[in-house]
Image (spheres, rainbow, N blue to C red):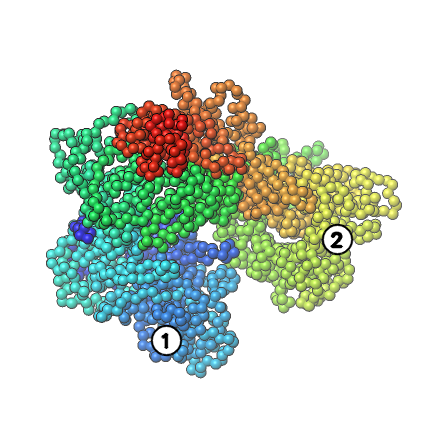
Amino acid sequence: MSNVYEERVTMIAAGEMQDFVPFGRDHCRRHPNATNLQLRQLQPASELWSSDGDAGLVGSLREVTIHEKQKESWHLRKGCCEIGEELDYDEELYVAGNMVIWSRGSKSHASSVYKAFTVDSQVLQALWCNFSIPQDKTECAEAQEKRERCVCIVQKSSVNVHTMDGKDYIAPLPFQVADIWATAFGLMFERSNPVQDIPLSPLREPLPTMFSMLHPLDEIAPVVCKPGGCAASLTRVQYVADYTMKIVFSGTAPSIILTYDTVQCLHTVWALRKIKTEEQNTVLRHPSTSGTPQQIATSSSLTAHLRSVSKGESPIASPFQNFSSFPSQSRSTASPGTHSRSHSPSISNMAALSRSHSPSLGASAFSGIQRFNLSTYTPSPKRGRNSHSPNSTLSDSLLVSETEPVIPELCLEHLWTENVLNVREKNSQATKVFLTSDLCGQRFLCYLVESRHQLRCVKFEESNDLTQLIFGTVTVIQAKDAAPLESIDTMVVLESCGNLVLYTGVIRVGKVFIAGLPAPSLSVSNPMPRPSTPLGSVSTPARSSSRHPGALDENVWPSPVPELNDSTKVHDSNYMDDCTFHQTGTYIHSLRDPVQNRVTLEMSNGNLIRISMPEITNSQLVKKCLQAIKYILPKDVAVQVLIKWYNTYNAPGGPNYHSEWNLFVTCLMNMMGYSTDRLTWTRNLDLEGSLSPVIAAKKARPSEVGSDEDWEYLLSCDYHRNFESHLLSGALHLDPLKVLRPKEEAFPNLGLDSSTLLFGHIPAILFVLHLIYEELKLDNLLREGARALVVLLHQLARDLKLDAYMDSYWRDYPLLVKNLKQSCKIDQAQLRLMNQPPFLTVEPPSIYHWLCSCLNGDVMSPFPYLPGICERTKLVVQSFALYTLGDENALSHEPSLYLLRIAAGHRKQQVEEDSKRRSLNPCTISATSLAAKLVVSLTNLGFTLKDLESVPFGVALPIRDAIYHCRSQPSSDWSEAACSLIGRQDLSKQAHEGRLNKTKSALGHLLVSDGASSGNEAEEEEDGMNDMNQDLMSLIWNEDLRVQEVRRLLQSTHPVRVNVVQMPEVSDHEFIEEKENRLLQLCQRTMALPPGRGMFSLFSYHPVPTEPLPIPKLNLTGRAAPRNTTVDLNSGNIDVPPNMASWASFHNGVAAGLKIAPASQIDSAWIVYNRQKNTELTNEYAGLLMALGLNGHLSKLTTMNIHDYLTKGHEMTSIGLLLGISAAKLGTMDISVTRLLSIHIPALLPPTSTELDVPHNLQVAAVMGVGLVYQGTAHRHIAEVLLTEIGRPPGPEMENCTDRESYSLAAGLALGMVCLGHGSNLIGMSDLNVPDQLYQYMVGGHRRAQAGILREKHKSPSYQIKEGDTVNVDVTCPGATLALALLYLKTNNRSIADWLRAPDTQYLLDFVKPEFLLMRTLARGLIMWDEIKPSPAWINSNVPTIVRQNNTSLNTVDGQAPEDVDIQTMRQAHTNIIAGACMAMGLRFAGSSNAAAFNCLYKYVKMFLESVSSPVAVLAGHHNLETCLSVVLLSLALVMAGTGNLKVLQLCRFMHKRTGGEMNYGFHMATHMALGLLFLGGGRYSLCTTNSAIAALLCALYPHFPAHSTDNRYHLQALRHLYVLAAEPRLLVPVDVDTNTPCYALIKVTYKASQWCDEMTVNLMAPCLLPELHLLKEIKVKGPKYWEIMMDLLKGAQCLQSILSKDGFLYVKLRAGHLSYTEDPKGFRSLLAQTFTHRDPEFLSIKPEAVSAFTSDPALLSFAEYFCKHSKKDGEKQEVLDLLSSILYECVTQEKPEMLPTYMAVDQAVRRLERKEMSETFELWQMKLVQQFYNSTSLQTNFKNSSTGLLINSEFLLAMKSSLDCTLDHWLHASGDVLLHSYLSSQPVEESQIAMLACFLVYHSVPTHQQMTASGIEGTTGFSQLLLKFSQLRLPVQALLRLAPVILGNPQAMLV
């Protein structure tokens, strides 16, 4: 072992050093808060230390007070980057005063502040900690816990936690904290122990000292521990209450805690884990180990202590004051198992609120502490309320019986304690603890006992079942300080004498040499410091925080006394003699802040210097070789090899970068016993990159004159050899230079030194390096590495006399290997010393050979591989086995059939872990075919297209083939990575968008239009429709300007034209009045526009969070022609109704708010910010609040703000707020919203409550709100109240006397919503007789007695309105009718429907108001949902016979009517019934654009339009007809919602122009709502027909329109906006993935079979509105232009729903050779179409210009540009250009552009062979693999079943094959047979032809000489015998035919 320690003198050169200054210090000075902190007075440490060494140190020690030490501290860690980022930077957390600065920076990037925090009081400590957030269990059972990365700032009374994504929490501390530690689960607290706690009476047991907090919102819970020994007995679990136990370290991976016992002076390791349920139960039952009365004292003292805290007393006061009580006085209800954090109302809301506010609430806000109590479980919770002992001084009120014990969350389990030493080492607490691992992965826990100058290292490892850690022996290293270097698995140790030494584990690597730092020189020869060295306790300012950054050491903070005493005790008289203080000059004082391979040195003069230690290797190749060697060797040998290499590589003045490999070879061969300076090729290596400058100087002294050796050296160097075999030298036809034979005779008998470290392991190393070589052959990027490695392998194989290996290397690199002739003799005695590993095979494993056999279907032995190192080999072998052999189990966990794992016994377990992690296992994604299985498996392994490009073309072919087969129809549920791998960027982008967070709109950025496309954006006024997506709308409606027309009709910001002609007789004053009256008429229309505008611009805008929402103004002025004078209503000339525009402004606000998309980023602050400052609440803002509720944002508004708005008493705001919140909480039964609504509904308040004066409209809104919140719940109490409210009588004091109809209607609609569609299945409501009661409200009758509670309310009747005791049907009928409709919606209940049939006699008809007939017909249609047919016949079937007979036509006056028939009644009944039926049809087919329904309704609209202007209109009543016309127009718009149908638009425009006569505000509103529905959401939205949607549409389109703008008598106007609840996004927009713009694509929609139609398919041109998804079976994007995408909706429509909700963008990808529909609608310009039209031979080769039109791939365009351009001059190039053009054409048209490089490579390989320029046989192997693949049987079967063609054109393959065959046969006949013969008879071969020979042997798989001999071919004479013997070697026939003449010696023999 002499050589292990031979380099005691070796030095390791550290990287450059930099001065280090914590970034935070500088930032603090500039921080605005710096003035308060007086940080400028904080002197830099360097000024405190004077230059004269000792005196300065001691002097300054007196000056530095402990207070000052706390002033600043910092610590660093490795930067946490997002997954996939490979950034190496440091994060620094700097603490000074009450500021914490978190910054990031690295060597290459400047530091920058990431976050800076300033808190109220002194920061005691700041640390990083990760909290876990439990995920919803619903998603999947074993959901990964999400980790929240946080920074925790500890102050005296609270901990502030700030998460990375901006949440802050404040957790008050219920006790004084000594220290806080971050663990794997959360924070751990150590309670500080006041001095007066110590003298405990024997009865008292101490309180717990350690607590945990798993999340800032959790309670602080005590920690329990399970001491060693009998682990089985659960009773031993107890609270950690030992105040002598101090935590000194906490680790997260593995989760362990190191504690120190201050009495026994021992360190102990504990495993920290979540507590088990049974342990919780045990602890809660038996808090202490003994059954003594102590138990009583414990639980009560703890409870009381924490209660005293909760009262708000000072937490420092001793808890042990006069009290005592029994434990049973507090019950515990929570069973420990169910105790978990859930953010549900079960946590007291106030507690949660109070935590999130400021720490000034202090401990009293700490809800958990009152419950903190270790009571025993008691069966009866109330037992012993009054049985506490008489001397208790606590009042009863404190012993609240509701307190529960706080349940412990974490448990410490004992793992290891250090051995007890004879002498108790006082003060031997570890000052620094860290985990490190050595170069072979063995892990150590190291702790520095500074007072002893010892670093103790304990080795630990996981047990075989991975459940626990096993700790080994302790190794002690003498050290003053130490720090781990994670990334290079070493640690730096500062020895007592001041040297820095590198260790790996406990093995010394070497001293660290830092350029620029003087080596420590000692003036006193005192070799070892005595144990009394006071360095551990001498505190220097720089050293203060290296123990624990800013540690809240109890010594430092509560009482500074003990530490000072301590240090004075140690300072004995010999203090000054200590060697460490006699170091002259500056020296390294300590180490701190290690990150990756960087560490900071603290110098004795206070300077900080950051150095980085060099990596183990930078070369990929050396790294792989080292991994393999490390894997195969025993651990101790491996560590020594790595140390030796590390020392060699990193010697001071180390090597230049390109010679790292040469250095490695030299180093490795030296360790194997070679003398590298005597082997020719290694000697050259040595000269090229010398080991150290010293040797180089000796070897080659510079001389002025040259010598021959210089030339020889150049010729024989590696570079020249490489160049000789380089492509370029062949291309330039350089003559090979004759190399002078090196004088090999100089060293005739080279031997090996068998005493070296690796001599015995040479065979094993040869084999693993050979496997690395095979691995490198599978990566194009590392092939140079294979060339370098083969030289080394050949040497080893030659010396071990492994001929088969030598032959295989020679076949791979004939020109490279031919020069290596020198061998070293290894005699028999030495051979016996070598371990012959069992896995070393005689035949070298060759991966190409194995793959060829696999393609042939031969039986192969498993291929050996090194787990974790040869991953590419494993992947390729498994892929081939799966895809070409069709073995689906090839990917199982144990792929033993095809792969042989080379076992190195010592790391079995770890490797198994790796393989489990890495094995290809087809995951849950559906994959049917082999190709799909292969693609999915590769994806799971993280294999990407980039990786595929580096796989050699022959090996990659099967994988590319699988990808090609999957491309056309991949499964719709494939992951993003799988779609990228098969080259479907459209699908991968879709999957990527799907993964993005749900809040952002997927392509919001992509299609945001730049306002109107008009271009005059600057002048354009905000009309509320500027943010519409113009590009998209112009794509949907591309033939006309209908969108501009809609904008013109719906804008309300411009003044209207007032056209009045002044008659001669009219005076000017009268004329002005006339103009103003005309304007008043027009204003009715302007005020009715906003609801329609809201529909048109629905969800089209994402507001900027920093800007208020623009609300367009409502312009009620006019301009009169010809002078364009302004006409104003406020001139006072005419009477204008008061508050005329108040509701119009409300609607305007709603319309503006509805623009905001539900996915926008909006929070409570933004909502409040939109309110105009310093003004009263406006109606617009009220509307905005309602809109925010409808799009779901209002649920973010805080309770405080809601309360604030409601107390202002602004009626509109309250209405908007109540309706908005109710809509946001639709169907949730939310209790807080219910409370809010109940205050506004007298019926929901107790009878004794104070009468509140609630405005009537607000009551209506509140009643409707209750219906929304309880929608579909059939809640008994709510239903009962609403049922009564429909018939609520008027009260004595004028309450409920005006506008009663709207209240009754709202109650009816609300009742219908609550019992929506429940029909007769109302559970528990049979006694209410809901249908009967509703029927009575509908037809009238005697009023029933009120229920108990409500009887009180309505005792006295109204003095104003005398109704008697009958039901007032005029008030109750509409509400009751619609309530019945919703209650029995879609139930097809005929008996109820018959109640609603229109009366069929004149007498009964006279009793029903005509508009009630409309309601009944509508209600009947909704109940008999399935019977609605889209035909006029169905509409007429609703009209009773008598009405039908008397109304032959709506438009003619029929004189022959019978005398007794009231024509007016008949006419009105007829129009209303038809309108009701039309509305039912509209709702039934809403959003379906059903053609039959459209035609039918269109007919009726035309009919009503005619009748309005016909003379008979008087009979039916103008108002009546207008209402019916509006209803039918709305129904038509319902059916065509979102389609923008032109005919309906024309109707709406016609109605828009009608402003006179009966056209009042309500009818205008209906017209423009119809227009809005038609263009719902700018064409992106449509309506759905779920029960909830029908209810919302009924409320919004209630067929009674307001007469004027302030009319709410029959229906509250605010409800008109509830249509939003029925809107759903259904527009599918194809987006071209390459250009990122929307485009047209053909989609095929398949409907499910249903009772109305069979399964059918329709072709639609997208962008288009899809039908409702529940009707569909599948959706397909159809070719030929685009790649197919199929979505199967039977499997689940989530995928499609998420696409539609994110603006409906579906990514599509154009097939190559096609143009989009916009450019080429008919497909005549496609590439194929062009080529087939020209029969001229010139056109067969494709013009490069043509390509550019059909592919956007820049690589293909450049290829066409540079390789396919025809030139007239050069004839011989023509053939090449034609070939390249046809290859390009093939790749483009067949959609396989990725095959272009393969085609080129094949072509190049063939040409190179023809020119005899092949220096290595790599390309021939690839050619063989390509041919074998296309001949393989598995492929043939694939093709029978597949529709896609071959990946490589078969003609091209045949041509290439014949070229290869010809070239080789030509060579064979010319001169090759002689060479071949001499090779087969193992005679020396002539060197000039050697490369061609190797090509021949590889291409024809010729066996080696040994194999020939073994099969006895030598003496064969006849061909038949030869055939027989060759069949054993499995030689292909074509090879046999070529070999036979050579072997038999005469061609004639073949004829036998």
Q: What number is the disc on residue 1390?
A: 2
Q: Among all residues in the image, which is located at the extreme bottom?
A: 390
Disc tally is: 2
User: Do the numbered discs 1 and 2 sit on residues whose CB atoms are within 8 Å?
Assistant: no
Q: Among all residues in the image, which is located at the extreme right?
A: 1459
State the SS at label 1.
loop
- Residue 779 visible to an observer of this rendering: no
Separation (CA) of disc 1 from disc 2:
78 Å
Q: Residues within 10 Å of mark 2 (few under 14, many from 20)?
A: few
Q: Amino acid at mark 1?
A: Glu
Q: Residue at x 53, y 51 (%)?
A: 1193
Judge by depth and name the residue closer to the eye, 1629 or 908. Answer: 908
Q: Amino acid at mark 2?
A: Arg
Q: Is residue 1468 left or right of residue 465?
A: right
Image quadrant where one finds the C terminus: top left
Judge by depth and name the residue closer to the eye, 281 or 623. Answer: 623
Q: Is residue 309 left or right of residue 1582?
A: left
Q: Residue at x 39, y 21 (%)?
A: 1773
Q: Mark 1 sits on what residue?
A: 205
Q: Residues within 10 Å of mark 1 (few under 14, many from 20)?
A: many
Q: Residue at x 61, y 60 (%)?
A: 1240
Q: What number is the disc on residue 955?
A: none
Judge by depth and name the residue closer to the eye, 1629 or 691. Answer: 691
Q: Is residue 408 above or below residue 1654?
A: below
State the SS at label 2.
helix
Q: Quadrant of residue 33?
A: bottom left
Residue 1367 in the image, given as x and y percentages of width and height: 75, 59
